Every structure is written in C-alpha cells, then in structure tokens.
Amino acid sequence: MTPLARWARAEWGLLYATVRGPLAKRRLRAVPMTVGAVCLTALLQFTQNQSWGYGFVQGVGAVRAAGPLWVSLLRTPLSLFVPALDLPVWGALTQVLVVFGIAEVCLGWWRTLAVAYVATLAGTLYARTGIAVGPHGPLGLPASDARVVDTGPSAAVVGLAVYLGWRYGAYVTAGAVAAAMAVEVALKDNLAGKEHLAAIAGTAALCAAVPAGRRLWHRWRWRHRRPGSGPGPGPGGGGVTGGRGPVRVRGRGRGVAAVRDGRVCRRSSPEGSG
C-alpha cells in the first residue's frame, strides 16, 4: 500500500466504513431527510425565480440583518434551504445531497439538522454583530450588508463538513475546509464568506461543548447513581474486546468502528440510534 493510500485510509477509512454499508443496502432510503432537503431546496429555488413566488420565499426564508431579530430567528430554519439567487442551483443541490447525506447516515437526521442549524445561526448572529461593530472594527461589516440576504445552505454544509471531520478523525479534511473558507474571505471580502467563517467558529464551539457536556453528564450520573447499581465507568470501559491484536475505537456516530490490526471493522453502537 502506497503512503498516499495509507493516509487516505487513516483520514477517511472510518467515515467510509460507516457510510458504505447503509448506502449500499438501502441507497436513498437510508437518507430520507436529505432527499427531502434536496427537494425542498429545488422547490424554493424554482418558486423564488417566479414573479409570483419571489415575495413569498423572501417573506418566509430570507434572513437579513436589517430585520427584527425575532423575525430572523423564525426564518432561519427555512433559510437553510433557500439557495442564493446569483449562484447556480445545481451547486447547492449537490452540496446538500452529498454532505447532508453523509451526515444523516453518520449522525442521524435530527443531529444533522441540529448541527446545520447551529452553523447557520452562528452566521446570522455574526452578521448583526459585525454591522453593529462597523467597517473599521475587528471583524466588522459595512452598514450596506444589513440589506444582503444571509447565506443559505452553504453555511450549513460547511459546518457539517467540519463537524464530521472532527467526529470521525478526518482532521486534515476539516482543516482544509476551514482554510478554504479563509482563502475565500481573503480573495473576496463579502458577507457570505465571513458568515462561512462564523459557521465554522460556531461548529468548533459545538465540538468543544459536546465532550464537555458528556463529561458533566457522566459525572452527574456517577454522583446520583442508586446504591447497588454496580461500579461506575472505569478507565477500561467502553472498549471492544475479543479478536487478535490491540483494538482502537474511533468515532462516536451511529456506526462506531474499531480499527484492529490496521483494518477498519465496523460495529453497531446504541448511542446514535436517533
């Protein structure tokens, strides 16, 4: 095996092992939420390009910093699926199909939507903060950006890509996505690019909060466990036993896999059954 192949296996092997089985067995039936998201994005794109539908889509899914915050919060969930008018819709549909589909298999549909919403909400809140700071402050924005529609599915896609990279050990991929967004801002300093960076920052905060919350939860359970319920979690818990050679468990998604003797061996996990 060449060094490049070994690197690719170490970087994407766990993610590939998690996604391959469900997609090969059930195909699109394994990602019903993603199929619905693609159809909804296509429908909103068609509607907003019609003279009779533009105002409707803007009213229910267009988020601008100039509007009231509570209106923006109500529109933000649907804004995930409103593609930009000045970009080809096939790009948005491809991004949603690929990234949302992988995330749905790995995380489940509700975790996928939760991460996508956090990323999009981070960009929405950043736009208001940046405009309040002004163009001369750090990370500030000009007042004219208050009338620009926030980025649509792309912020959610970027956030999901970074989150999957962190969760499944594809750290180089996650770093490459973040670096690409930074280059985008350097080459084309616009609201969409900066919202992508804000989405990455929001996702990074979520990545830090997940293990911290898990530790607090286990600590709370340990302190409040009932007498006679057995010993609490020890340093040797949670592993995979049996087989030959040492076993290294990676990932925390629906399809947790173990790497044994250099091979990725998938096993089921009750944790991500959502």
Image: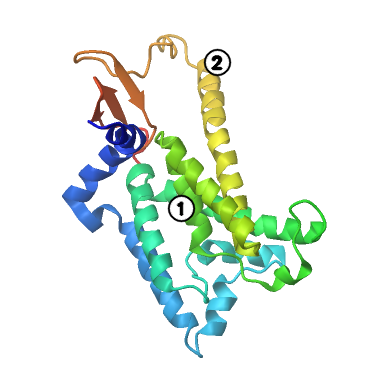
In the image, what residue type sits under mark 2?
Answer: Arg
Residue at image location 35% in from the left, 43% down from the top: 106
Rate crowding at label 2 as few (under 14), some (14 to 19) or many (20 or more) other CA atoms within 10 Å: few
Which quadrant of the view contains residue 89? bottom left
Residue sitting farthest toward the front = 2
In the image, what residue type sits under mark 1?
Answer: Leu
**Marks 1 and 2, how far apart at CA:** 32 Å
Residue at image location 43% in from the left, 49% down from the top: 112
Mark 2 secondary-structure assignment:
helix
> Would you say residue 195 is visible in this rendering?
yes
| Mark found first going from the N terminus, 1 or 2 | 1
From this view, report whether residue 47 is shown above or below residue 269.
Answer: below
The N terminus, quarter of image: top left
Number of the front mark, 1 or 2: 1
Horizontal side, residue 102 vs residue 45: left or right: left
Which quadrant of the view contains residue 12? top left
The percent position of residue 221, horizontal first and vertical second, equals: 51, 21
The percent position of residue 225, horizontal first and vertical second, equals: 49, 16
- Pointer 2 residue: 223
The C terminus, quarter of image: top left
> Would you say residue 66 is visible in this rendering?
no
Query: Mark on residue 113?
Result: 1
The percent position of residue 29, horizontal first and vertical second, equals: 24, 56
Residue at image location 54% in from the left, 19% down from the top: 219
Query: Mark on residue 170?
Result: none
The percent position of residue 5, horizontal first and vertical second, equals: 28, 35
Residue sitting farthest toward the bottom = 51
